[in-house]
Image (cartoon, rainbow, N blue to C red):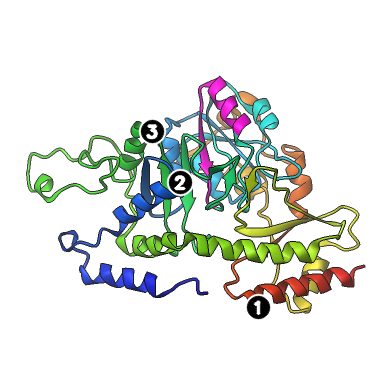
Amino acid sequence: MQRVTALERRYVAEVLDTEFRSSKGSGMTARLERLFIELCGVRYAIAHVNGTATLHSALVAAGVGPGDEVLVPPLTMASTAMAVLQANAVPVFVDIDPDTWTMDSHCAAACISERTKAIMPVALYGLMPDMDPLMSLARGHGTMVIEDDAECILGTYKGRVSGSIGHLASFSFQSSKQLTAGEGGMVVTDDEDLALRVRRFNSLGYAGVGTSKAKITKEDIQDPRYARHVSVGYNYRMSELCAAVALAQTERVHELVEARVRSASDFARATAGCAWLIPQRTPPGCVNSYWTYVIRLAEEAPTTWHAFRDRFRSLGGDGIYAAWRLNYLEPAFVEDRLYANGTPFSDDRRRGGVSQRYALGLCPVAERIQPRLLQFRTNYWSLADSERQAEVLRRTIASFE
């Protein structure tokens, strides 16, 4: 199979044939949104320019603003926490479950305060968090849950597909993701009011847009008395070219995700029986869509992270990715270089209701696990390539035993 096929090229050509004039048709963005509604089993979908803009829009739609707190995990791409800063709010980092590596609901309960406006768990590596206790926690405190599903298309939790459980959910089409248009993103929700807020925020606050309408009409803008902006927003709309590619990819979603799952299965077989390489636990009732296949190097392993990586590469492996440095240990956080809309956060404001300081010791489970995670690519479109990498992994393990 191929990651990009004739279908993507045909849809792009259809957009180019319109010369970017909406009067000539195409409507790729609207088609993509309708398809995502079906995919997630929700009522509304709003396409965005990227998967960080989606988080910003979702947070603002949820009412997050200056001084509010948002619970986030520390083990993920920093865009999650940075979107909270974009909303002029305070990221509060919640430790992770030691086996699934997703947000720990017990730790979330310990971190929640009267200033918590939203909980934003991440579906890590293709695995959804334990959503039921997080949703229950949110209900008990009158907060909203925003799923960050950038790494999880078609993952399921107790029979429910990613994007269908939280009040809002965010997806990414960045180049490494399971579905890609080079860039792009999607917000989905079942709530009409939230959908309208998201649409207006990603469309410059235009009065003429709606939950299923992304553009104002020519009749509107040809009236000199027309009041366009009912609120302040950003130009976060997805382009028709990106939508064309994302639409084709979404039409092929099962094929693309199955290729990742197949590669993960090859790696899982290669590591089976190795006591010092521990895979991410997928709980019963959940389906992991394996954006990447990740194992943890046990403390008693006969090698180090770097030595294992180097041996894997020397035997013909494509390389091993490291997990992100924990967000709150990045220099921007440790050194208080936190800006949102040009305003630096003071120490008192950043602490919020939980007096949280961004330093070692904040999330001990995440701090223990993050340096020991080995991330393997799953985007092999050839079965032979996937099997070859799994064989290199087997040989690497054997070389240390």
Q: Residue at x 64, y 60 (%)?
A: 292
Residue identifier under label 3: 191
Residue 348, image x, y percentages: 59, 27
Q: In the rendered view, tell whether residue 382 sits above or below residue 37.
A: below
* Secondary element at image label 1: helix
- On whether residue 387 falls in the magenta region, the answer is no
Residue identifier under label 2: 40
Residue 208, image x, y percentages: 20, 41
Q: Which residues are magenta?
A: 132-150
Nearest to the observer: residue 8 or residue 94: 8
Residue identifier under label 1: 384
Q: Residue at x 31, y 55 (%)?
A: 31
Question: Of circles 2 and 3, which is in front?
Answer: 2
Q: In the rendered view, tell whether residue 18 sits above or below residue 113.
A: below
Q: Is residue 401 left or right of residue 251?
A: right
Query: Mark 1 or mark 2, which is nearer the start of the sequence?
Result: 2
Residue 394, image x, y percentages: 81, 70
* Secondary element at image label 3: loop
Tell me the distance, in whole angstroms, between the alpha carbons under discs 3 and 1. Answer: 45 Å
Query: Mark 3 or mark 2, which is nearer the start of the sequence?
Result: 2
